[in-house]
Amino acid sequence: MKTILSLIRHLLVTANFFILGVVILSGLAGCQQNNPAKYTSWEVYRGDDGSNAYSQLDQINTKNVNQLKVAWVYRTGDPSENTTLECNPIIIDDALFGVSPKLKAFALNAKTGAVRWEFDPFPKDSKEGGISRGLSYWRSGKDQRIFLFASNKLIALDATTGKQIMDFGENGYVDLNKDLRGKEGLAFHEDVKNSSPGIIYKDLIICGSLVGENYESSPGHIRAYDVRTGKKKWIFHTIPEPGEFGYDTWQKESYKTVGGCNAWSGLSLDAKRGIVFAATGTPAFDFHGGERTGQNLFGNSVIALNAATGKLIWYYQVSHHDLWDYDLPSPPNLVTIKKGNKKVDAVAQITKQGFIFLFDRETGTPLFPIEEKPVAVSKMPGEQSWSTQPFPSQPLPLSRQKFDESIITDISPQAHDFVLREIKKYSWGDLYLPPTLDGIIQMPGFRGGAEWSGACVDMETGIMYVGINDIPNIVQLEPVGSEVDLFENLSMQKAGNLLYMRNCSACHGEDLKGNGQFPPLLQIGQRLKPVEVENVVEKGRAMMPSFSKLSDEERIAIISYLFKINGDKKYKNTIAANVAISEQKTRTRYRIKGYSQLLDQDGFPGVKPPWGTLNAVDLNSGDILWKVPLGQYPELAEKGKIATGTQLFGGGIVTAGGLIFIGASKDEKFRAIDKISGKLLWEYQLPAGGYATPAAYQVDGKQFVVIAAGGGGKQHTKSADYYIAFTLP
């Protein structure tokens, strides 16, 4: 390689070879890292280190896309009950690497779909699983590795054979629960996973995390590990410790007790500058901040770190002291835009609020003005909400940011009247209306605006394409904890009921009937055994996080309640009860009554359509170029309600062939859309919802597009286990 580079440099002095030399030199330089100078491979999650999901391949284009056919289908073989697939596969040469609903890693022949190897990180017949949005790849000479997150483990695999590399970490893996809090932290079990892949910088894998969102959750610190040994090389505290910048934006002891502020959606990398970019989530607990008074850095922030050392370069907090679960839902997009006659390397961050923030990549200086505007002040006991929030001047918001009677659904008079009666129970108003005990209508809801599926950017034009949800949520708080002093003498079933109400009812309902977003638990004994439920409570599964912080007695009590198991065993003074009792003396904690949307009597969103849209935004000018509904409800389409859109979960990719490929919609279709006009050019009915980001790649001169079709998830459509690739005849 050095000899070739030296030869090219020599040729550059000759004018006749100047252009050829620049092209070849830049191409070879790109081969030395995961981010190719030309966007023709898919070796990194979301296509490139900048997270732009862009492909320069143009064999499939606007003129021939309607000829697309299924090239191959791969089924992982996993049971498909209450699972989902959100994986964006990576392609290395002619091998495709992905993850199953049960977190098995696999390698396929990218041309035929034939299996090369599979690796299951869990014991046979294990009920463990979760969500994985992708894998990481590193190579040095003949050493090629795939990195997989499973439960609390970071695992390194031989990319050629799929065998676990046993001298990586301890016993073949890095335990993400270790080395997270300092010695002064609380001595309870950490519960850290990762649903998004790490980013590779030289010989480091840099990782965010998936942590809980309730009291006593783990902190979301960002860490880097040696790709060969698994040794931790650095850590950046997203909840600062004493002496660190940002420590004074919290209460004195917050770094010991508060969780969240995690880069759960993945990371982006400017390898040339050696800068890694993160977008963080909300501090825990999401909807009431009485135990985390202050601005709460680095929650809800875009962060630029030195990739080699983890040192802070710059940050920008897009929501102060968040009370709405407005996590930054996707990794920053690293783009190059034009400001006047000058090209600027920039960072673009989409948000659940429907904003797009743009910053100079090196300095963090906003590229469009951002104004701190006064917002409503919380009246909740113990709360000290922040009095202002940042609003970018451009681009304009992509979702509605205010609820009032003028946007109540109009799909039928009956639906309108039903929602009109329903909203009278709650308060509503502008963005950043604080949650209350009586309840508010939050618009946009905490599912977006934008979501984890992120945005794709045409790197030739600087135009961003992003799916947007436009559905309100109902957020109502209620106090918890007043009953804990009764636990000592309660029967197991009664203790289990109280623990269920505290930990489970927000998702599964106080009446065990679910809430449309999460499944019911009534008659759970007809589907699962007590030991299986206990395993899920402890280790998590699919969308459900682990509740490993609960003691054995607490889990047994919940099982007793769910399965109506009789017995006279008494609830004992466990660690959790003692903690709750001591805190009850000094403060009141709150929980959200349910993760529910504002819906009509038939379960359709309670606001006027469209409810899900695909948007084109020119990042150079800040202009919105077009907005089109994405997805349909067949039962409404039959009545002429075609342009409704649906809730969206799953990303799009944009190609030089003039196309956007995207699944995401609840109608389970995979679509190709003209990137200039937003016009639908092709669609395919998937066997299950495509709630993942596709990938585009080329093998033996032939272009393919592949998508994971696993259904399930927050769309609550049927679950499955498909990967489907398409190509031209």
Image (tube, rainbow, N blue to C red):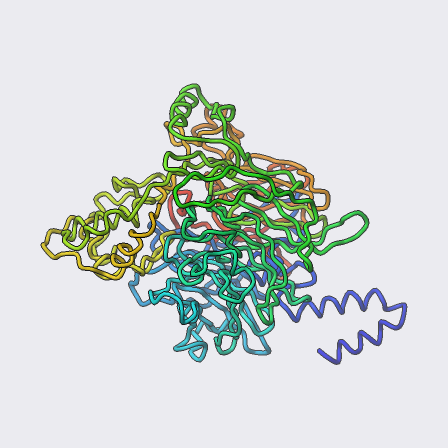
Task: From the viewer's side, name the closer residue of 39 and 269.
Answer: 269
Residue 65, above or below 704: above
Residue 389 found in image quarter: top right
Q: Is residue 610 left or right of residue 537?
A: right
Asked if one can make out residue 23 in the rendered structure from this viewpoint, the answer is yes
Residue at the outermost top position: 413
- Where's residue 84, x and y in %? 41, 51
Q: Is residue 328 left or right of residue 582?
A: right
- Where's residue 93, x and y in %? 59, 66
- Where's residue 141, x and y in %? 59, 78
Residue 232, above or below 599: below
Q: Is residue 631 left or right of residue 172?
A: right
Question: What residue is drawn where x is 41% and y is 47%?
Answer: 713
Count how many numbered circles sit on residues in the image.
0
Q: Quadrant of the N terminus?
A: bottom right
Residue at the outermost right position: 15
